[in-house]
Image (cartoon, helix red, strand yellow):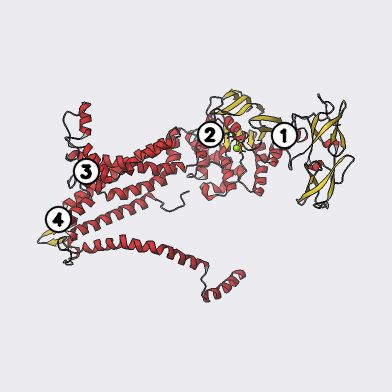
């Protein structure tokens, strides 16, 4: 106690004489290192976001972007002449929200399941494993627009190789319009997304698998635990943090899906996502105010879902899982 | 009765054979320690007994039952790993109960066995902790507890104390000895710590490059090493070796000529020894007499290590060899001094040119 008092007494003049204590100088150094990044983020993310939110409260038009008026929440919801107007009562918007959620939920689920299986397979040791690991990544490495266009051609109802093959095998009797048929369009989009992003999932989960302590598995063998039980009782709980992080990455990505859907099915309402809807309002209909409002809402939907996921799934994004 | 019998056990990884035919009988309730230099195959041999590695050739029985094809869980063994191998996501209680739970033991049985093991190891208060919330020593206890809960016929330990600090090691070592008494089980223990091997073992198996060099009680290995390898491996600091040649052969002794016109008569059975043969004299540092004796080696002290209770003097002989002499802690030995190191013939060992010991005759 006395010693502590003495230390304080000794430290005080040092601070007063202009020298910072170790803790404070560390904090200052941290801010200095962070500042450039924060500045860049503010410019490239903060500013556009602020502008978008701001435009959401105006009636701006793409043909004359300089002239707009502030209209409050009218883009979101407005009561006029006994009728409700605005995004929140627009059936097309809610259709886009539903499409996005369906797409995100199904594709991320499939990618997680398939990614887990592939990761487990790649984690086993067999000759040529490293080559296969690299090869699996190819779909992920191709830019989305390129792979979407590629699949667009393969799925084409008249010239597509898929129809040709399935008809050759006698599975189909006549060509199917994969991307135009309302029943099939969403399935086609999900399939292409799964094809493209499963490798990413597999790789993230594989990284998790490789961190697993191998001696636990030997202990399980001595304990006589059945391999299926080992998977569900040991492997899965241990890689859960890795899977949760991988899922959140994918979920954030899937909820703002734009390029794949736009290239594959353009503005079709069967597959229109929130981003495609916002682009349609903003560019095709030139309604910058309304489109910005849609973008803002999209941002909020994603933010809310992410928070729900992190809190609900107890995801630990920081360190300290092990 | 959990006797473990190994007959001609061999193990190859791919084309490389690492265990070259081990014959070993571990009696019921015996505490057997495997020692040997790093990479000699101690862990591999233990894992073969555990069933974690497949036996390439030979036969193994545990408790009279052939186990070559049995999976680990059915061999009646429990293993404690060097790195503890606890399930990181389970509490201590679940770690210990996991095997029993999956074997569909009743809740009461599980509870009773876990509590009993926890009681023995004094980890009752840790049962709700996760492994990462415990110290290394506590984790090691949990790992031992998990083995106890399995109620095995044979305990297998792979360097269980090597991650603990010196004080904790001594304490846990004593507890292990006590555990062996209480559990009345067979124990096989791998270590490269001399002291652990000497203090714990009923029987030590010295391994070298996949071969058994010698099997015997700690004192047998200390007093009657069968070859140069065992002589050099058991004991710390290591036994001194001095090259010499046979000057005369008796019925019950060999007279050796050592560098510096020194001669000494050592009481051994002179099997096949002939005058003029090259031999190696072995004498432990603690058996060299710092003040000199009738026959003695004399050299210059290079380095002195003061251990408190004793001093270790590194003496270089005129022929270039170095011998270590242990003397009393308060003896005044200075670097640069000429120092005589007296030989007590009754404490000397003699090895032939192939490294095999001439059996010592104890008067
Ligand atoms: N899975 C394996 N594949 C190939 N070689 C192996 C394998 N496991 C062990 N070996 C080889 O077998 C030999 C014995 O290894 P082992 O682990 O039994 O040594 P050890 O005596 O336990 O050594 P240490 O004291 O360092 O633990 C070594 O040469 C090692 O390279
Ligand atoms: Mg080992």
Residue A201 can be seen, yes or no:
yes
Whole-angstrom CA distance, mark 1 to mark 2, is 33 Å
Q: Are marks 2 and 3 in contact (CB under 8 Å)?
A: no
Residue corresponding to mark 1 = B230
Whole-angstrom CA distance, mark 2 to mark 4, is 67 Å
Give me the disc on residue A264. 3
Q: Earlier in the sequence, mark 4 or mark 3?
A: 3
Residue B311 can be seen, yes or no:
no
- Chain at numbered mark 2: A
A173 or A65: nearer the eye?
A65
Give me the disc on residue A285. 4
Whole-angstrom CA distance, mark 4 to mark 1, is 90 Å
In-image side of B249 versus B52 (left or right): right
Whole-angstrom CA distance, mark 4 to mark 3, is 21 Å
The answer to whether dots 2 and 4 both sit on one chain is yes
Q: Position of residue A304 (x, y in %)?
A: 30, 55
Residue corresponding to mark 2 = A222
Callout 3 secondary element: helix
Callout 1 secondary element: helix
| Residue pictured at 67% horizontal, 46% vertical | B170
The answer to whether dots 2 and 3 both sit on one chain is yes
Front: mark 1 or 2:
1
């Amino acid at each position: 106690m006395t010693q502590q008092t003495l230390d304080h007494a000794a430290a005080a003049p040092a601070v007063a004489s202009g020298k910072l204590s170790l803790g404070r100088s560390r904090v200052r150094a941290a801010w200095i290192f962070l500042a450039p990044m924060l500045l860049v983020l503010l410019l490239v993310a903060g500013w556009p976001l602020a502008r978008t939110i701001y435009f959401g409260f105006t009636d701006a038009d793409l043909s004359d972007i300089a002239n707009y008026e502030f209209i409050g929440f009218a883009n979101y919801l407005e009561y006029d002449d006994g009728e409700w107007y605005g995004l929140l009562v627009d059936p097309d918007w809610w259709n886009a929200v539903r499409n996005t959620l369906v797409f995100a939920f199904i594709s991320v689920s499939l990618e997680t399941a398939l990614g887990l299986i592939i990761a487990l397979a790649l984690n086993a040791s067999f000759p040529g494993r490293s080559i296969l690991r690299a090869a699996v990544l190819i779909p992920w490495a191709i830019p989305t627009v390129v792979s979407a266009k590629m699949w667009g051609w393969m799925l084409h109802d008249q010239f597509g190789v898929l129809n040709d093959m399935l008809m050759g095998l006698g599975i189909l009797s006549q060509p199917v319009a994969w991307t135009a048929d309302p029943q099939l369009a969403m399935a086609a989009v999900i399939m292409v997304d799964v094809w493209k992003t499963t490798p990413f999932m597999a790789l993230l989960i594989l990284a998790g698998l490789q961190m697993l302590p191998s001696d636990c598995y030997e202990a399980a063998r001595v304990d006589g635990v059945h391999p299926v039980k080992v998977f569900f009782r040991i492997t899965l709980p241990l890689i859960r943090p890795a899977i949760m992080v991988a899922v959140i990455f994918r979920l954030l990505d899937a909820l703002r899906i734009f390029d794949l859907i736009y290239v594959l099915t353009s503005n079709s309402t069967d597959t229109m996502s929130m981003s495609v809807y916002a682009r349609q309002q903003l560019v095709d209909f030139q309604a910058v105010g309304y489109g910005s409002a849609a973008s803002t809402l999209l941002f909020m939907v994603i933010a809310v879902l992410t928070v729900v996921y992190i809190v609900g799934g107890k995801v630990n994004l920081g360190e300290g899982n092990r | 009765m959990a006797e473990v019998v190994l007959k001609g056990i061999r193990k190859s990884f791919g084309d490389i054979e690492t265990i070259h035919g081990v014959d070993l009988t571990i009696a019921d309730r015996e505490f057997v320690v495997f020692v040997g230099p790093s990479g000699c195959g101690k862990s591999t041999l233990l894992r073969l007994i555990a069933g974690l590695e497949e036996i390439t050739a030979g036969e193994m029985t545990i408790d009279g039952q052939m186990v070559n094809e049995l999976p680990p869980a059915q061999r009646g063994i429990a293993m404690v790993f060097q790195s503890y191998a606890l399930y990181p996501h389970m509490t201590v209680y679940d770690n210990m109960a996991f095997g029993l739970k999956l074997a569909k033991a009743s809740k009461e049985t599980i509870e009773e066995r876990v509590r009993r093991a926890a009681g023995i190891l004094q980890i009752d208060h840790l049962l709700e902790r996760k492994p990462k919330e415990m110290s290394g020593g506590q984790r090691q206890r949990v790992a031992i507890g998990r083995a106890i809960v399995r109620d095995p016929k044979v305990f297998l330990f792979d360097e269980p104390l090597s991650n603990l600090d010196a004080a904790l090691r001594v304490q846990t070592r004593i507890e292990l000895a006590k555990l062996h008494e209480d559990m009345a089980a067979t124990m096989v223990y791998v270590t490269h710590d001399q002291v652990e091997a000497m203090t714990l073992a009923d029987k030590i198996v010295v391994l070298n490059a996949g071969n058994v060099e010698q099997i015997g009680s700690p004192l047998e290995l200390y007093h009657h090493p069968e070859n140069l390898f065992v002589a050099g491996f058991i004991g710390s600091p290591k036994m001194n070796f001095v090259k010499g040649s046979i000057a005369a052969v008796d019925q019950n002794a060999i007279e050796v000529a050592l560098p510096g016109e020194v001669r000494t008569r050592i009481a051994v059975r002179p099997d096949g020894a002939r005058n003029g043969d090259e031999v190696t004299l072995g004498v432990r540092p603690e058996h060299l007499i710092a003040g000199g004796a009738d026959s003695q080696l004399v050299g210059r002290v290079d380095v002195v290590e003061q251990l408190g209770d004793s001093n270790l003097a590194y003496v270089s002989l005129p022929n270039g060899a170095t011998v270590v002499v242990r003397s009393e802690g308060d003896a005044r030995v200075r670097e640069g001094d000429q120092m005589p190191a007296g030989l007590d013939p009754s404490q000397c060992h003699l090895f032939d040119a192939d490294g095999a010991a001439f059996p010592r005759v104890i008067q």
